[in-house]
């Protein structure tokens, strides 16, 4: 992911597709917004026990009420995202068709809890699309986090330290299949070598409705690779109290992402693949006793 963070993508077609995406989302947002105008019931006149003289002297004018519709204002986060992407030479790392897979789920679930491994040019977009929910970003590069925070201080992001290397992937994959890794447990207490235990406590305590794995760096042998992120995302999904978690993994054209998603997120839980993005729906394993992967 970090290999393309600072590359400018100026192709007109990409910007046109991105602008079209936001305009479509904006239209859907406006159509779904409700303009509540409740008409009051017809005025009623209550005549209490009064003397005849009081009734003759009392005049009750008709009561009228006018309700003025209130326009729903565009959320600032969405307005900022539209402005940013239509005036910037940088665009999200994922293609329009890949992004659309996640937005379909967000349209159904948002506002919700959305955890993203990776902080990049698409972060403002994800936060805006989950308006009203909580979107948290985890990244391995402190300098990059500081850079993004200065530009978009409203984005919630945290640093993550990884102790794995891509060259260890085969060994880690075999470990991931052993009982200590497939047993259901809190990630913080797991004995599995793949479990990420150094995240902020909040990350473990929130039940995430969506998890996107688009980091850390995984394109060279000495890079951390996404093995631990994929495993941890899967275990967090299994550990939620009930319901299901939608997990998305990008760059599944690479061997590590391909093997680890199939083995640790399970092919039986895969819903769809679009381009380099895979979508998994993983149910809670706490509400039911389920095997690590479905049969």
Image (cartoon, rainbow, N blue to C red):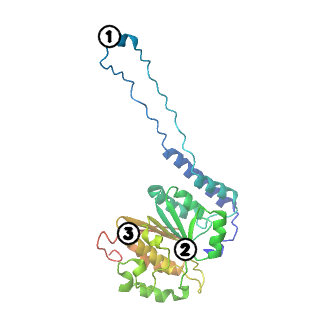
Q: Nearer the viewer, mark 2 or mark 3?
A: 3
Q: Residue at x 55, y 69 (%)?
A: 137
State the residue at coordinates (66%, 54%). 83
Give the class, few, some or many, for how many residues have Cα within 10 Å of label 2's Cα (few <14, many ≥20). many
Q: CA distance from mark 1 to mark 3?
A: 71 Å
Mark 1: give few (<14), some (14-19) or many (20+) Cα within 10 Å: few
Residue depicted at 42% across the width and 87% down the height: 175
Relative to 187, residue 131 above or below: above
In terms of secondary structure, where does tag 3 sit?
loop
Residue 235 percent location from the top left of the image:
41, 75
Q: Quadrant of the N terminus?
A: bottom right
Given this view, does label 2 or label 1 mark the residue nearer the observer?
1
* Disc on the earlier residue, 2 or 1: 1
Cα distance in 3D space between marks 2 and 1: 87 Å
Where residue 190 sits: x, y (%)?
Answer: 40, 82
In front here: 47 or 287? Answer: 47
Q: Is residue 183 left or right of residue 137?
A: left
Instruction: State the SS at label 1.
Output: helix
User: What residue does disc 2 label?
Assistant: 251
Write down the residue under mark 1. 52
* Residue 62 position (above or below residue 237): above
The residue singled out by tag 3 in the image is: 240
Whole-number angstrom distance, CA of label 2 to CA of label 3: 26 Å
Q: Which of the two discs, 1 and 3, sits closer to the camera?
A: 1
- The quadrant of the picture occupied by the C terminus is bottom left
First-in-chain label (1 vs 3)? 1
Say which element carries label 2: loop
**Between 86 and 33, the one nearer to me in the picture:** 33
């Amino acid at each position: 992911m970090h290999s393309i963070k600072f590359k400018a993508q100026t192709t007109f077609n990409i910007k046109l597709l991105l602008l079209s995406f936001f305009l479509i989302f904006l239209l859907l947002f406006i159509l779904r917004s409700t303009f509540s105008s409740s008409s009051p019931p017809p005025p009623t006149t209550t005549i209490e026990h009064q003397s005849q003289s009081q009734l003759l002297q009392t005049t009750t004018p008709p009561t009228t009420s006018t309700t003025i519709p209130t326009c729903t204002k565009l959320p600032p986060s969405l307005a900022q995202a539209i402005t940013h992407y239509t005036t910037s030479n940088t665009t999200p790392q994922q293609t329009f068709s890949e992004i659309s897979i996640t937005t379909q789920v967000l349209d159904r679930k948002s506002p919700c809890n959305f955890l993203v491994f990776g902080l990049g040019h698409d972060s403002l977009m994800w936060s805006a699309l989950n308006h009203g929910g909580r979107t948290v970003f985890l990244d391995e590069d402190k300098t990059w986090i500081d850079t993004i925070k200065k530009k978009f201080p409203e984005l919630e992001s945290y640093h993550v330290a990884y102790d794995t290397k891509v060259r260890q992937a085969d060994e880690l994959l075999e470990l991931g299949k052993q009982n200590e890794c497939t047993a259901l447990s809190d990630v913080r207490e797991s004995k599995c070598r793949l479990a990420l235990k150094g995240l902020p406590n909040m990350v473990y305590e929130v039940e995430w409705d969506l998890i996107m794995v688009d980091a850390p760096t995984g394109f060279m042998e000495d890079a951390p690779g996404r093995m631990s992120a994929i495993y941890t995302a899967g275990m967090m999904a299994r550990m939620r109290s009930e319901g299901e978690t939608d997990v998305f993994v990008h760059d599944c054209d690479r061997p590590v992402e391909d093997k680890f998603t199939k083995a640790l997120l399970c092919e039986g839980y895969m819903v769809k693949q679009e381009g380099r993005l895979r979508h998994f729906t993983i149910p809670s394993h706490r509400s039911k006793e389920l095997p690590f992967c479905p049969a």
